Amino acid sequence: MSDFPIPVKPKSRFRLALESDLFYTFKRSPVAMVSAAVVLVLVLAAVFAPLIAPTNPFNPASLNLMNGFTPPMAPNAFTGDSFLLGTDDQGRDVFSTILYGMRISLFVGVAAVFFAMVFGITLGLISGYVGGWTETIIMRTADVQLTFPSILVAMLIFGVAKGVTPVEYRDQMAIWVLILAIGLSDWVQFARVVRGATLVEKNKEYVQAARLIGRKPGAIMLRHILPNVLSPVLVIATISLALAIIAEATLSFLGVGAPPTQPSLGTLIRIGQGFLFSGEWWILLFPAATLLVLALSVNLLGDWLRDALNPRLR
Amino acid sequence: MLAYIIRRVGQSALVLLIVGLVAFSMFRFVGDPIDNMLGQERTAEDIDRLRAQLGLDQPFVVQYYKFLEGAVQGNFGVSYRQGRPVAEILLERAPATLELAMVSGVLAILFGIALGVFTAIRRDGVLANVIMSGSLIGVSLPTFLIGILLIYLFSVELGWLPSFGRGETVDLGGWSTGFLTESGLKALILPSITLGLYQMTLIMRLVRSEMLEVLRQDYIRFARARGLRDRAVNFRHALKNTMVPVITVIGLQLGAIIAFAIITETVFQWPGVGLLFINAIQFVDIPVMAAYLMLISVMFVGINLLVDILYFFIDPRLRADRSGGH
Amino acid sequence: MADPVLSIRDLSVEIPTRHGIVRPVDGVSYDIQAGEILGIVGESGAGKSMAGNAVIGLLTPPAHISKGEIWLNGQRIDHLKGDAMRRLRGKEIGMVFQDPLTSLNPLLRIGDQLTETMLTHLPIGRAEAEKRAVAALEEVGIPGAAERVNSYPHEFSGGMRQRVVIALALCAEPSLIIADEPTTALDVSVQAQIIALLRRLCRDRGTAVMLITHDMGVIAEATDRVAVMYAGRLAELGPVRDVLTHPQHPYTHGLMASTPLASQGKSRLHQIPGAMPRLDAVPDGCAFNPRCPYATEKCRQAPVPRVSNGQAACWYPLVDEKVI
């Protein structure tokens, strides 16, 4: 053996991730693994919906009204066509509408959380770092907003945004308005956590040092303070995702969300509810079950993540 | 104590003022009600006449003043959609929502606290764990799905309970109540469970975690060391201390129930202010939206104020700190 | 000699952990007579409090009594469960905790906490209990007791609160008091008052006291006999004067020498090399052997003899050696 230090090949990021505590607790939690797997499958199904779905339910050319109300796994009385999960009143394949609906639900959910995260982190960093009046105004606004349930805030924002959108663009813009409404209703949590951490970090020596050597405030916040708040932000983001998916479904169900031309899971449930009494249960049941499984798995994953990253909160 | 209450009232007024500004801005700047009310076939005279009728032709300051003056008197103008005074419509609808919210709130608080205490005391018991797992599903389950599920079970399959509306109501000096008729009471059951379930789950989980925290405290160990009965330790000592932080959240939840009534009222076609609000959003009926916002803010702020005052009667430390004490 | 109030025989407490079973109390025996104050001394983690918790039946699961017997006034109590044990707590055994700031329920009046304790254990009515509550507060030296019964805990200072805690522990007239570090959280100026109070009350009533502390000053001042614990085991047991001035166990000797009280005038305090072993890694033989200057092969292998009064758990007890 030589006395010289043998250069150690640095571990790849992948290996580091595999050996981390987080991954260790992940492997030990069956609930987390199952929910992660379910979420993964659903996300993939949503992303590749155009490839997986047997039909494009929103292409009028592919629809046959004769196929309406076909029960699952049974041939249609007129056309003999068979559908895995049946069809709705207009002959659209329920399985396909669910895939496309989930695509919209997930897109709105992820985009809204991303928007809330960026917005909240930015305001949190600014109010923590700058302080003074800026902080007072931002945090008081947050307090007032927090007094109201976020779903109500989202509805109001949706209503107002709808009001300022010209009538002819409303359906086109609805998805974006929805993202804006849910995102704006959910930024407060991010801002609070980031502000708190910023207040703690900004007085630490290394931040003072960075300031002394003339780093710009923006750079200090991004390079030094932000990395310290990533794990709580990740937890909040996951839990917010479940809430955002539910919020989107709720708004769409209430008819103040995704338009019928771009139905999300909530819109599908709204449509399906109409057939509850007439016996066409599949039009309602399958979208509802999908929504439930999706929301529950994301929720469980968020719960596990919170416990794993912050054992104190247990 | 008086100083504290005055300060809290001041803060509440400030919040209401901010919300009022939001409501007025909506009123003034959002959308063109003329578009909404007249549709495609309109003439210039129609537009001008309606403008004048709604007061939209007046200068900003005049409208602002009129809005404030009106709001204080409970006057929020005329609904774009129904052409009737908003206040009149709201008053007509309010009893339905308040009765529903009241029943749900009582259910949520009673069961939420009872189950929370149970799961905390029997934290390792089988039943307690089943309840806890069930509650996670309860939190993930969107309110409207619970409603649909209940309708399917009890209206479609079993046919026991009505699936929409509030049954027969009795008019008591302008307040239409569903409490006095059989069909009214029956109609209340499913909506109030739907509305209360989510809040109950939240209250239960909160009570449980707070109570577990309290049960770890020294004074609980000391109470046990003095040989007090389990009942006294759990209910006299632990529960009282648990309730201090829980009350704030319960207050917020009561407000939330009134807001979440929007969803339940839509599922059950319950003729309350929530359904009115959803229709207002769909048709961009700004006066109704603004009035609803103001109404619900007053309720929220009022509940929060009550909760803060309630603290004085529960926590002697606050009483002493705020009133100068010893 | 009369029958002891408390008699502990070969008591062991076990906690199963991921790294195997640890024994925070391991084969401990001692008696406490009526009116006697027994000091239990040792470093933190030596198992002092755990023994007290075992006696009053408040071990936090999964900790449990694995061996031995506890006798209170001729009744065996180590196997008592639930309600039977609860009836003894407060009634026969009173307990005083370390921190008076957290021992009292902040939301209940002092008087209510006193009366509920008495009503639980004594066959008296509310009016009588309220009268006794005032008397109990007067007895522990709280001025204006008649009004102060209606005060809340936060309205008292730390020392006054500990007086209230003592009143609570004594109000149902137990025959044994377990005082677990009763002065540690208090100001130095108040410590002596509290110790004197505890001493006076117990002498007057003939209450036996188990006084758990790590403070040799408190031991010297208040106790009749002292039990020295090390790594869950009893190192030495004897009259306080003997143990303080003529320690027989090398650990006790080191402890005395490192206490400012006993080594007054010395320029440097003695230090015991090393640290107490973790409970999951207690060495074979005498637990103290790695740190003991006199240790032999025998100390590393053979289990040490159990102690009775006036003895040290040591193969080679120090004979008449003055503290350095």
Image: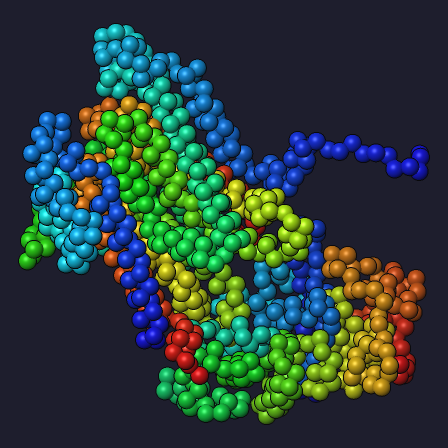
- Residue B276 is left or right of residue C316, and the answer is left
Q: Residue at x 32, y 45 (%)?
A: A153
Place of residue B271 in the rendered image (x, y in percent of width and height, measured from the top left): 15, 44
In the rendered image, which quarter is residue C184 located in? bottom right
Report the residue that reaches farthest toward the top: A79
Q: Residue at x 10, y 50 (%)?
A: B88
Q: Nearer the viewer, residue A74 or B323?
A: B323
Place of residue C224 in the rendered image (x, y in percent of width and height, measured from the top left): 71, 86
Place of residue C173 in the rendered image (x, y in percent of width and height, measured from the top left): 52, 84
Q: How many marks?
A: 0
Residue A185 seen from this side: yes
- Quarter the N terminus of chain A occupies: top right
| Image vertical order of residue A215 relative to residue A16, above or below | below
Report the residue that reaches farthest toward the front: B59
- Residue A180 is left or right of residue B98, and the answer is right
| Image vertical order of residue B149 relative to residue C47, above or below | above
Place of residue B109 in the rendered image (x, y in percent of width and height, measured from the top left): 31, 56
- Residue A189 is left or right of residue B277, and the answer is right
Q: Nearer the viewer, residue A179 or C1?
A: A179
